Image: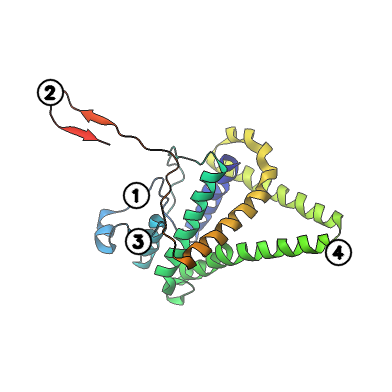
Amino acid sequence: MLAFISHIGTGMVRRALTLIGCLPIVSGNIGAFRRTVLDEIGPFREDTVGEDLELTWRVHKAGYRVVFAPRALVYAESPSTIGALWRQRVRWARGLLQTMGIHRGMIGNPRRGRFGAYLLFNAVTMVVLPVAQLLVLLDLVFLLALGSSPLGADAWGFRGWLGLLVTLVFSIIALAMNRAWRDLRHVWALPLVPFYSVFTSLTMVAALAQEVRGKEARWNKLTRTGVVSVRAPGSRAELRV
């Protein structure tokens, strides 16, 4: 499912955000920054788990342009268990919340132009709507338990199938942009998307709770790390990684 729907984010959304000058992140997987820009605005901060997001906002704040390079290729580590996916998405959500706190003066600020307006839109869609989605779902469950529904079964079925159809169309367009037709073999996982949407909303709620409590934020590597010793022939020096 992740391999299939991620093309929407990388193949379509980031291209669109580049066109309007509002790309909010240079992905931590692979990115390039001009050394002169980093000398001016500073390197990664160590007080946030969204260091790539925070740095990109600083680049925008300094007046520089941020673009997406669609032909760049990187082999990224992806969660293979529900637990690892949960920890990663909570970390991403906390990184967004922390970055919003650091740069709250940019959100909706007219002096920041389109990027400031986009940050306000992003705050609503990424923070407010997930909470609202869960509240609406809880309300629907309560109404259905009472035998009452604002919409009939046919209407809910139509909305569900329409949502899957729209997701499929956007996914195919994104696959075409990325020339990744091979990933069509994962189309069977499309019905999982609504559950994934609820899952990501839950991660935002968890991130909000952890931020309010002041819980320590950890990077949560997806795999275990080991120690590898490397020694050049004829040398006493040893590099331990």
Q: Residue at x 59, y 67 (%)?
A: 128
Location of residue 91 with respect to 192 vertically, above or below: below
The residue that mark 1 highlights is 32
Label 4 SS: loop
Which comes before the other along the chain, label 3 or label 1? 1
The residue that mark 4 highlights is 148
The residue that mark 3 highlights is 47
The reply, left or right, for residue 215 in relation to residue 234 is right
The type of residue carrying mark 3 is Asp
Which comes before the other along the chain, label 3 or label 2? 3
Q: Tell me whether the residue at label 3 lies in contact with that at label 2, contact meaning CB atoms closer than 8 angstroms.
A: no
Q: Residue at x 60, y 57 (%)?
A: 202
Which comes before the other along the chain, label 4 or label 1? 1
Q: Quadrant of residue 4?
A: top right
Q: Which is nearer the eye, 136 or 115?
A: 136
> Label 2: how many residues lie within 10 Å, few (<14), some (14-19) or many (20+)?
few
Q: Residue at x 18, y 27 (%)?
A: 232
The residue that mark 2 highlights is 234
For the residues marked 3 and 2, what is the alpha-carbon distance in whole angstroms? 42 Å
Label 1 SS: loop
The type of residue carrying mark 1 is Ala
Q: How are the colours assigned in the image?
A: rainbow
Percent coordinates x, y for residue 205 in the rendering:
57, 61
> Label 4: how many residues lie within 10 Å, few (<14), some (14-19) or many (20+)?
few
